[in-house]
Image (spheres, rainbow, N blue to C red):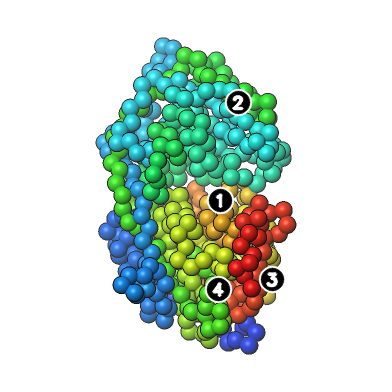
Amino acid sequence: MKKLLFAAVASVALIAAPALAAPSISGERIGQHVEVLASDAFEGRAPATPAEAKTIAYMVEQLKAAGLSPAGDIKDGQRLWTQDVPLARFEIKGPVEATILAPGAAITLRQGEEIAIRAAANGADRVDIDNAPIVFAGYGVVAPERDWDDFKDMDVKGKVVVVLVNDPDYEAGEGDFGGKAMTYYGRWTYKYEEAARQGALGLLVVHESEPASYGWATVKNSNTNEIFDIIRAEPAKAHVPVEGWIQRDVAVDLLARAGLDFEALKAEAQTRDFQPRLLEGVSFSTAFEVDARQIISQNVVAEEPGSEWPDERILYTSHWDHLGVGAPDASGDTIYNGAVDNAAGIGAVIEIARAFAQGPAPKRSVGFLLVTAEEKGLLGSEYYAANPLYPLETTVAVLNLDAPSPAGPAKDFSAAGDAASQLQDMLIAKGEAQGRTFKPDPRPEAGSFFRSDHFPFVRAGVPAISFRSGQDLVEGGLEAGQAWSRDYTAEQYHQPADEYGPDWNLEGMAQDADMLFQLGLDLANSRDWPEWKAGSEFKAARDATAAARK
């Protein structure tokens, strides 16, 4: 990484909350955190590597210096700064062999090129599949409430299933799955889960950049690295032996060799009348070894205790991990620094924490949860939501910050997906106080609502939102903001090029952090309990714990 210079930026003054003088948040300080955490010295911040200890130590040092209190596990009667997160770690050892056998042809698929196979998380130390039949199962969805079943009467035991990414509605933009906005059925995580329920031998997702919302480089870098999961008593019930992705051209060729047309089957898969197809005469083989072990990673947990209602808390979340060291890019760089994703989010949350610590004590407690293993499937936040250090029923709200933009101040802002909650309305009001306009998620089809650390809390019923920076930039407008976003997704996201640079405009990050600080400050000094709106699928879980909230 080149030696970096700080961009000279002004701190953004906070809008004063009623009766409280609010300190300012410094964009320069956020940048200082990013430059450190995204430097080559931190080796991409992968969990279960020496870089984890260095990352944890830095965050704890900064929170302690800012005046926060530890709020993690209790050991020997003392609160720690961390929460242990036990995880299972899986890594492929040696080469991956993958072959398609078809009439008159044996086609070798190169790991990371035509195929991206994940290390098996089903507990096996070796995967050896020989000529397994292949089934095309549309979008791989079983949704009884929508009268939808892509498997129907097809028995996929002992077979490898090939499915499309996203929802059946993606192409047409309307239908039984909410139109263009992705449902959980469109997430690749769901498709793997359903394959396990169906008893399949493997599941391969067909990669297409638009419905996936990212290119093949992201798939390769995210899936051919080590894989983590929560500790499971019976991992084979949650994971099939082979989980992975294949390039679209590979899928087209597979179907063609079985006498089937990819585009015609895709169109049929968008209807509930779709019938799964066995690819006659075509089979899949693969063999590889897996190193499986259990590790302990860590969430960092700090707080500013409440002066009147300390058992009620607002929780800020952000993930510290990235992809570590991996395959080299075209320049030979092997360190996936993760500057925007998500050293920037960590830097902003540390500075929000500093603002709370330096101001008057809030009436409710304010917690800061910096989580591990987001890149491995939201595992740090999943673990906390399943093993909360403080009751979720009295957690007022969760405010998540992931990958804030360094493109500069924006006239708008957004959130990942549609939270359908009063919390989102409160965020919108805070934005208006800044003179900014809320824009709904511009790409709900990307499924961002299910891809950030607020989601495990959402599933538990806690009102939660994941903030997104705006794109209508003060300098350059919407065209400049969209151009930055496109470039970042194509050239930097989950790639070694996601580095801190002297061209970053830190004023926008400070503006975003200010808005989230102001929202948390209001909640921390009120008796408000934001709720899910009528019709939300998460409302029932929250309502079930209503008696715990006064």
Between disc 2 and disc 4, the foreground one is 4
Amino acid at circle 2 = Lys
Q: Is residue 242 left or right of residue 517?
A: left
The residue under label 4 is 312
Between disc 1 and disc 3, the foreground one is 1
Q: CA distance from mark 2 to mark 3?
A: 47 Å
The residue under label 2 is 152
Amino acid at circle 1 = Phe
> What crowding class fits label 2: few (fewer than 14 Cα within 10 Å), some (14-19), or many (20 or more)?
few
Amino acid at circle 4 = Glu
Name the residue at 47% across, 25% down: 157
Q: Quadrant of the C terminus?
A: bottom right
Q: Is residue 117 above or below residue 2?
A: above
The residue under label 1 is 450
Contact, mark 2 vs mark 4 (Cβ under 8 Å): no
Name the residue at 58% across, 48% down: 447
